[in-house]
Amino acid sequence: MSVTLVLLPIALAAAAAAGGVGALGAVTTAKGNARTDSGPAPEVRVRTRMKDSTLLADALAALGATGVEVSRTRVTAEVDGVALTLTLTEDEVWEAHVESLDGRDVTVASATELLQRLDAEYAAGVQQAVAEKIRLRAESSGFDLVSETRDADDTVTMVLNVRTGA
């Protein structure tokens, strides 16, 4: 069995949720949760911040994925006994297809949980990339990095001072 998930950019998902579609904080619709062998795979729409295929690959690696292959519009990997294929549609929306590799059923819940873990790893990667850009650009932009702390939940807090005369 397999499940297909459509990963909506956060702004689109917020608009859909306002229209009365949303639940799970991320899942916005599901078709055919009880799949028959002849019916289509369940489809779930999931809100996401994921855009960059390279950061997606890094997030998959952090989840322990193997066989990761990346292009601008497609990312494939094996993770937790499933084959995950992320494809960027013409509308710039990621679609994720999750298919079992070990004979176990892939459910909407298990596919959604995998994508939520991937999204969390992706967010951590984005935070690291942004923090690195701030560190690299602070001085040339007229700032001094006074302190940097990381909380238990991996939140990074940076204190910058504006240089006199900057």
Image (cartoon, helix red, strand yellow):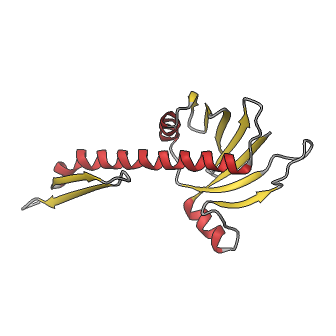
Residue 33 is left or right of residue 96, and the answer is right
Give the x, y percent position of residue 145.
17, 52
Q: Indicate the quadrant containing the C terminus: top left, top right, bottom left or bottom right.
A: bottom left
Which residue does the image show at 66% across and 66% down from the upper left? 23
Residue 79 is left or right of residue 139, and the answer is right
Which residue does the image show at 72% across and 30% down from the upper left? 101
Outermost top residue: 67
Outermost right residue: 38
The mark tally for this picture is 0
Measured along the vertical axis of the image, is residue 18 above or below residue 80? Answer: below
Which residue does the image show at 67% across and 44% down from the upper left? 96
Give the x, y percent position of residue 43.
76, 52
Measured along the vertical axis of the image, is residue 166 above or below residue 137? Answer: below
Image quadrant assignment for residue 8: bottom right
Residue 163 is left or right of residue 107, and the answer is left
Which residue does the image show at 85% across and 52% down from the upper left? 34
Image quadrant assignment for residue 128: top left
